[in-house]
Image: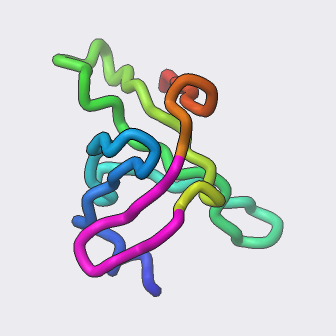
Amino acid sequence: MRLSELSGKEIVNLYDGARMGIIGNSDLVIDENDGKIIYLLIPNKRMQFFLLNEKNFTEVPWDSIKKVGPDIVILEIDNQNSKKMWKF
């Protein structure tokens, strides 16, 4: 699957059924040595505004992705333990 084919797919957490965002609005963290995807960074949609280009992201390990379908990406993370926020 090409990266362009992932764009526009909705991300849903199997753990709690929450909609987490759209792949097109997300970023990928790729290991420079072997080219494998490590994390998916999903923007925190609860933010009402961004201050001086500061954005909050949820870090999702690529191993948490369970299924990529035609319109949706299903992943499974426990929001209490696996959620990390990054500020850029």
| Boundaries of the magenta span | 66-76
Left or right for 28, reference 81: left
Residue 70 rendering spot, x and y as whole percentages: 27, 80
Residue 82 rendering spot, x and y as whole percentages: 61, 33
Q: Is residue 25 magenta?
A: no
Residue 52 rendering spot, x and y as whole percentages: 31, 16
The residue that appears at 44% across and 51% down in the rendered structure is: 27
Residue at the far right in the pictured view: 33
The residue that appears at 38% across and 39% down in the rendered structure is: 16
Residue at the far left in the pictured view: 48
Q: Is residue 43 above or below residue 72?
A: above
Q: Main secondary structure of the magenta part?
A: strand
Q: Quadrant of residue 42?
A: top left
User: Which color mode does the image show?
Assistant: rainbow
Q: Quadrant of residue 54?
A: top left
Residue 86 rendering spot, x and y as whole percentages: 53, 26
The residue that appears at 27% across and 44% down in the rendered structure is: 19
The residue that appears at 44% across and 32% down in the rendered structure is: 57
Q: Is residue 68 above or below residue 64?
A: below
Q: Is residue 11 above or below residue 33?
A: above
